[in-house]
Image: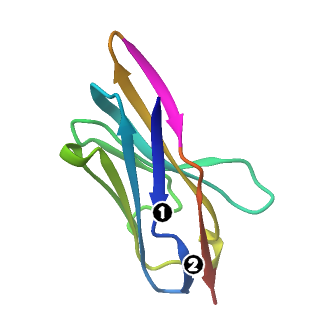
Amino acid sequence: QVQLVESGGGLVQAGGSLRLSCAASGRIFRIDNMGWYRQLPGLQRELVARITIGGSTNYADSVKGRFTISRDNAKNTVYLQMNSLKDEDTGVYYCNADARILASTYNYWGQGTQVTVSS
C-alpha cells in the first residue's frame, strides 16, 4: 500500500518554469528508482526523466538541458524542475517509483498532474 501524490502542475507561459513534486507514502523500506513520465495529447506515455537511489539520472532527449530531476530520500520525494517550457511540453505528467518492501520490489504510479504551456 504505497501512494504517490504529484503536485505543482498548472498553466504557464512558454519560456516559463514549473516545479513538480511527488511524495511517496506508505510502508516502504526504500525507494529505488523514481521517475517522471508524461502523456502528450494523442501520444503514448513516455519517459521524461529518471533517477536512481544513488542519484544517477536519465533524461529524454527532448528535455535535456531544460529539465532537472532530483530527490530527497529522507522525504521519499522526487522533483522535476522544468525550465524553458515549450508548448510541446503540454501534457499529463505522472510520477513513478520502484518501492522495496520486504524482499520484493513493486512499481507504483501517481494519478498524474496536468501541465499546460501557452505560447
The residue at the point 48 percent across, 57 percent down is 6
Three-letter code, disc 1 = Val
Is residue 105 within the magenta segment?
A: yes
Three-letter code, disc 2 = Lys
Mark 1 or mark 2: name the one nearer the start of the chain.
1
Real-space Cα separation, disc 1 to disc 2, in angstroms? 10 Å
- How far across and down, in percent of the image, does residue 56 sit? 27, 41
Categorize mark 1 by other alpha carbons within 10 Å: few (<14), some (14-19), many (20+): some
Principal secondary structure, stretch drawn in magenta: strand
Residue stretch rendered in magenta on the structure: 104-109
Categorize mark 2 by other alpha carbons within 10 Å: few (<14), some (14-19), many (20+): many
Quarter of the view holding residue 10: bottom right
- How far across and down, in percent of the image, does residue 32 sit? 32, 31
Judge from the rendering whether residue 25 lies leftward or rightward of residue 113; answer left or right. left
What residue did someone put label 1 on? 63
Please say if 26 is above or below 105.
Answer: below
Label 1 secondary element:
loop
Quarter of the image that includes the C terminus: bottom right
What residue did someone put label 2 on? 86
Callout 1–callout 2 Cβ contact below 8 Å: no
